[in-house]
Image: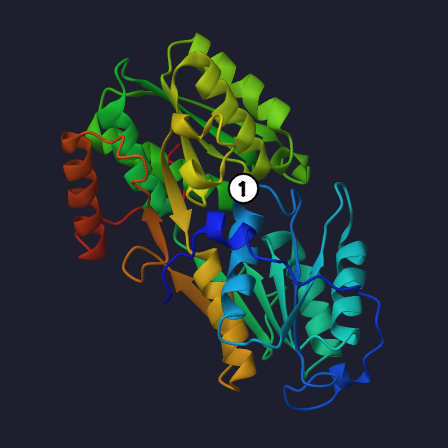
Amino acid sequence: MKRVVSIAAAVAMTAGLAACGSNDKSAGGSGNGSSGSEFKAAIAFDVGGRGDHSFNDASYAGMEAAKKKIPNLKITTAEAGEGENDQARENRLSQLAASGNKAIVAVGFVYAKSIGNVAKKYPNVKFAIIDDASPDSKGTNVEQITFKEHEASYLAGVAAAKMSKTGHIGFVGGVNVPLIQKFEAGYFAGAKHANPKIKIDKTYLTPAGDFSGFAAPDKGKASANSMFQKGADIVYAAAGKSGDGVIQAAHSAGKWAIGVDSDQALTADKSVAGSVLTSAMKNCSGTVEDFVNSVKDDKFSGGNKEFGLKEDGVSLATTGNHLSAEAKKAVDDAKKEIVEGKVKVSPTPSK
């Protein structure tokens, strides 16, 4: 497993952009060659797209990191639209596959059905989907990349409980779906382990099926403001680009936010980044980089690959050195217990 690539460094690189609509017949051929000497790879973003300072940016950083080993790598990006259906996502992936891309990454579980269908039509193209291991996306030419987000969130909960001065913290989820509930479950468990009397508020910005909750900073800001006004002094956001609003609210209130997926003390707007206490990260960058390299080197293997603390697939950031010595020790102890199997973190919220 590769270590997390700094998103701040990645966004400074020049993005290799190309139109999705080219008609490169090599997409249906064999081997990994593309037109000329290029090796073509593509990434289809989730709602929020490039610039979300989180999930999508972390995944794209993996593409840019792969360029270091593959100088002739040509990267195509494709943005998602709010409220789009599976057919729109399928059309996007089909266009990318028909354009000669040999390695295609779909960012987010919303692509599950679409990638499953398209992968069958393009058996010689290799696909990866992040955050889904369902039968819908399964295929011999599909790598299903998943993470134990609940483990990193557990550490975030420990840190929050140890750092809270009011004994009151909060959680903002983007969309109320099982994936985001994993973040909630780990955060609550870790916080209650560190302080059984901790008070935790929670809210989800949108219900299942409405993915706009991942791209609504105004809603994230309003929800966090409400929690701060009620006494919370630390709020964890697992909400994609909506998390930007939570960080803004924390800065305005003189409180703390906990970032997600990327090290948001590095990726958030510099004017508010100092209000990020820590971030529960997942190595989207490293897994995307490994996937692209495996396709180029003819070492691709499909199936589900799950990454947790033990595999360095998830972690807790310490940028800014905001955590107290007590909080750091509690986090380190909790990580050790999880890695050694002494503590099992449930991915499902308790009732």
> As rendered, which of 37 and 111 lies closer to the eye?
37
Quadrant of the drawing holding the C terminus: top left
User: Element type at marker 1?
Assistant: loop
- Residue 349 in sight: no
> As rendered, which of 7 and 225 lies closer to the eye?
7
Residue 179 in percent (x, y) is at 50, 46
Residue 160 in percent (x, y) is at 30, 28
In this view, 53 is above or below 56: above
Badge 1 amino acid: His
Quadrant of the drawing holding the N terminus: bottom left
Residue 291 in percent (x, y) is at 51, 72
Q: Quadrant of residue 142?
A: bottom right
Instruction: List the residue tagged with mark 1.
Output: 53
Residue located at (38% from left, 18% from top): 255
In this view, 331 is above or below 119: above
Residue positioned most to the bottom: 30
Callout 1: 10 Å neighbours few (<14), some, many (20+)? many
Q: Quadrant of residue 153?
A: top left
Residue located at (67% from left, 87% from top): 33
Q: Quadrant of residue 250?
A: top left
Number of marks in the rendered image = 1
In this view, 205 is above or below 130: above
Residue 272 in percent (x, y) is at 47, 26
Image color mode: rainbow
- Residue 321 in sight: yes
> As rendered, which of 275 and 84 lies closer to the eye?
275
Describe residue 82's horizontal placement relative to residue 152 as left or right: right
